[in-house]
Image (cartoon, rainbow, N blue to C red):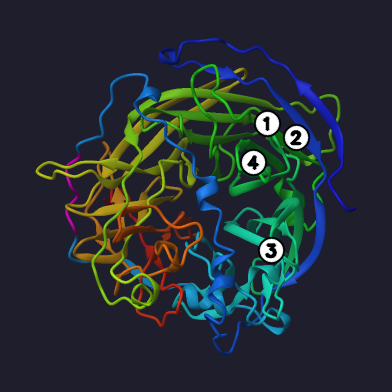
């Protein structure tokens, strides 16, 4: 099969309860439901990684031409006019900083040198320089798997020893090399935004990323895109995987499109994807896309009976919400929902607002139908409810400590980088004990401090569904703030006992970019900030320098410019209840010419009432 075939396209119209946003009632969403085929791409296995670092910086212009699509996929905030009621950034008491890390273990993960040098055979020296890493992380059995833009590796979880990789993602998925550095160069598939998850119920690892076709002569994007899916054939990710492709070119408004930042989730029946579609022609936001398919078929190496696609329009809903980064949840204890299976999603109320005090909760009912061929009774119900929350909003960039710079003196003397914290989109979502747990980066202030800074707003949302209804309300919530510093790109990990922790990046004018975590207690309390991976230098990557990055980065002044960071961390839960956290930092290992980012993996053991 050369493309997707839509073998059933049914429009399911259901009644909408038109309500004022302040009423916060649930409503069933009127959506089209399209049934698609998934495509098999064969099998894959990780290699043992390169033996030496491939040459870097041979052609700086070549490196610049494949900078990520960050400027395209950031949603603009339109200011106070979007705020329904007068809101101000929260003023938050700073968390104390811990002086010790009990029950802690950690190790260095992938860094830019690993990413740039990944690839063997024809893939040797074929990687572009990417920044930021966009971390995916998952843990199961004796293995810890990490993936970044654009490489993956498997470690022994007990001691951090490398077991397989780093492997180039294009090599792993059987694509063309990113670039063959001949004269003239030959360009291959563009891939980005990897994520992974270990599903204990099926004993399988799942890995995703998006792909865009390119012109091999120019490197320009063509009208073709996909989300790629890999599923391990056993519980050992160092052996063979099955590969699948979901073509996304026509999914959105004003296509051809691509699905940015594929978000993943799981319940007992289904594997779920959510993307933000953008037009490859205009660059405009083309609507969020929800996908659902049988997890059990994928785990068995078989094509699912169908893939359900639900497109969400790129416009305000009747309740005032704007669907963007509608994040599916992953369950820690299997499907705890009734009515033939329910998958929950969580999103911020309106990504285009500077400040918000609401969340949007979503529920897809009848997910058990994903395991059977479609028929007249194959009907899914999507509900949405807007709920009140604490205030959160657009964060400022994060200052960092000044260290030894390599790249700045070459082309941009005097320029120093600050770290991009992006916006307040919803991060990773976990469903445990009938609650959705997640967090966002937010702007906030603290007593006795003048300037706005980046902090974290976290949420624990109680959810329940009955036939024709979704009930949801914030059960607990709170903030994380560092005195005269910034914490950003949170990832919440929750074990089956409901014990939770948040991992994040952290920096300040007196602290190199590091990783940290807090444990969550009851009543909106977050414990002391623990520094896990201690930064050893300043961020000094090419995306923050006007003469290196294309397009040039935003600059607060001629000598203070924004470097890409994040765009997300990851959290995972092990079988023994340990919470694992993966975040970006600047570590001690050797750098390349173009970037010096690294990642740090943290394991903490949580006990009941431990905060």
Q: Which residue is mark 1?
A: 340
Mark 1 / mark 2, whichever is N-terminal? 1
Which image quadrant is residue 29 in?
Answer: top right
Mark 2 / mark 3, whichever is N-terminal? 3
Mark-to-mark CA distance, 3 and 1: 46 Å
From the viewer's perspective, is residue 469 above or below residue 278? above
Determine which of the numbered discs, if any, sits on residue 219 in the image. 3
From the image, state whether disc 1 or disc 2 is nearer to you.
Answer: 2
x then y, percent, for residue 211: 68, 56
Q: Is residue 260 left or right of residue 220?
A: left
Residue 204 visible in the picture: no
x then y, percent, for residue 415: 31, 66
Tag 3, which secondary structure?
loop
| 94 inside magenta stretch | yes
Q: Which residue is mark 4?
A: 282
Tag 1, which secondary structure?
loop
Q: Which residue is mark 2?
A: 369
From the image, state whether disc 4 or disc 1 is nearer to you.
Answer: 4
Mark 3 / mark 4, whichever is N-terminal? 3
């Amino acid at each position: 099969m050369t493309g997707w075939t839509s073998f059933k396209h049914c429009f399911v119209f259901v009644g909408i309860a038109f309500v004022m946003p302040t009423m916060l009632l649930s409503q069933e969403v009127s959506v089209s439901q399209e049934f698609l085929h998934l495509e098999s791409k064969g099998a894959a296995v990780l290699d043992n990684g390169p033996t030496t670092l491939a040459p870097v910086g041979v052609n700086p212009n070549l490196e610049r031409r494949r900078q990520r699509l960050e400027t395209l996929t950031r949603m603009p905030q339109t200011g106070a006019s979007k705020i329904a009621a007068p809101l101000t950034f929260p003023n938050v008491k700073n968390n104390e900083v811990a002086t010790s890390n009990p029950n802690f273990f950690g190790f260095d993960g992938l860094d830019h040198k690993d990413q740039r040098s990944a690839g063997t055979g024809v893939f040797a020296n074929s990687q572009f320089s990417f920044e930021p890493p966009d971390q995916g992380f998952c843990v199961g059995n004796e293995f810890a798997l990490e993936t970044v833009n654009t490489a993956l590796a498997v470690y022994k979880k007990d001691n951090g020893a490398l077991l397989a990789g780093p492997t180039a993602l294009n090599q792993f998925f059987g694509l063309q090399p990113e670039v063959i550095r001949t004269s003239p160069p030959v360009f291959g598939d563009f891939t980005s935004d990897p994520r992974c998850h270990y599903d204990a119920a099926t004993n399988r690892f799942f890995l995703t990323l998006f792909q865009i076709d390119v012109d091999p002569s120019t490197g320009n994007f063509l009208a073709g895109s996909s989300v790629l899916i890999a599923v391990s054939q056993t519980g050992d990710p160092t052996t063979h995987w099955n590969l699948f492709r979901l073509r996304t070119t026509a999914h959105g408004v004003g296509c051809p499109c691509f699905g940015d930042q594929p978000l993943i989730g799981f319940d007992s029946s289904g594997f779920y994807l959510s993307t933000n579609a953008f037009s490859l022609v205009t660059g405009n936001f083309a609507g969020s896309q929800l996908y659902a398919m049988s997890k059990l078929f994928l785990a068995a190496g078989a094509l699912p009976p169908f893939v359900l696609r639900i497109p969400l329009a790129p416009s305000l809903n009747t309740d005032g919400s704007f669907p963007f980064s509608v994040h599916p949840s992953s369950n820690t204890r299997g499907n705890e929902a009734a009515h033939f299976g329910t998958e929950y999603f969580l999103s911020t109320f309106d990504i285009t607002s500077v400040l918000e005090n609401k969340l949007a909760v979503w529920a897809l009912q009848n997910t058990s139908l994903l395991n059977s061929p479609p028929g007249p009774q194959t009907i899914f119900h999507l509900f949405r409810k807007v709920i009140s929350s604490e205030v959160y909003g657009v964060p400022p960039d994060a200052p960092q400590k000044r260290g030894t710079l390599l790249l700045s003196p070459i082309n941009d003397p005097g320029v120093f980088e600050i770290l991009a914290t992006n916006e307040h989109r919803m991060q990773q979502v976990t469903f445990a004990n009938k609650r959705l747990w997640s967090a966002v980066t937010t702007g906030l202030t603290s007593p006795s401090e003048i300037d706005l800074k980046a902090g974290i707003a976290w949420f624990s949302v109680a959810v329940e569904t009955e036939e024709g209804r979704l009930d949801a309300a914030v059960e607990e919530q709170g903030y994380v703030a560092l005195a005269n510093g910034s914490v950003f790109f949170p990832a919440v990990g929750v074990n089956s006992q409901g014990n939770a922790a948040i991992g994040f990046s952290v920096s300040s004018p007196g602290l190199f970019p590091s990783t940290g975590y807090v444990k969550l207690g009851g009543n909106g309390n977050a414990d002391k900030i623990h520094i896990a991976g201690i930064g050893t230098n300043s961020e000094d990557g090419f995306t923050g320098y006007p003469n290196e990055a294309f397009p040039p980065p935003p600059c607060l002044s001629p000598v203070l410019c924004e470097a890409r960071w994040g765009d997300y961390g990851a959290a995972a839960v092990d079988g023994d209840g340990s919470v694992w956290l993966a975040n970006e930092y600047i570590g001690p290992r050797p750098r390349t010419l173009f970037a010096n980012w690294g990642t740090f993996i943290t394991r903490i053991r949580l006990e009941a009432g431990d905060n």
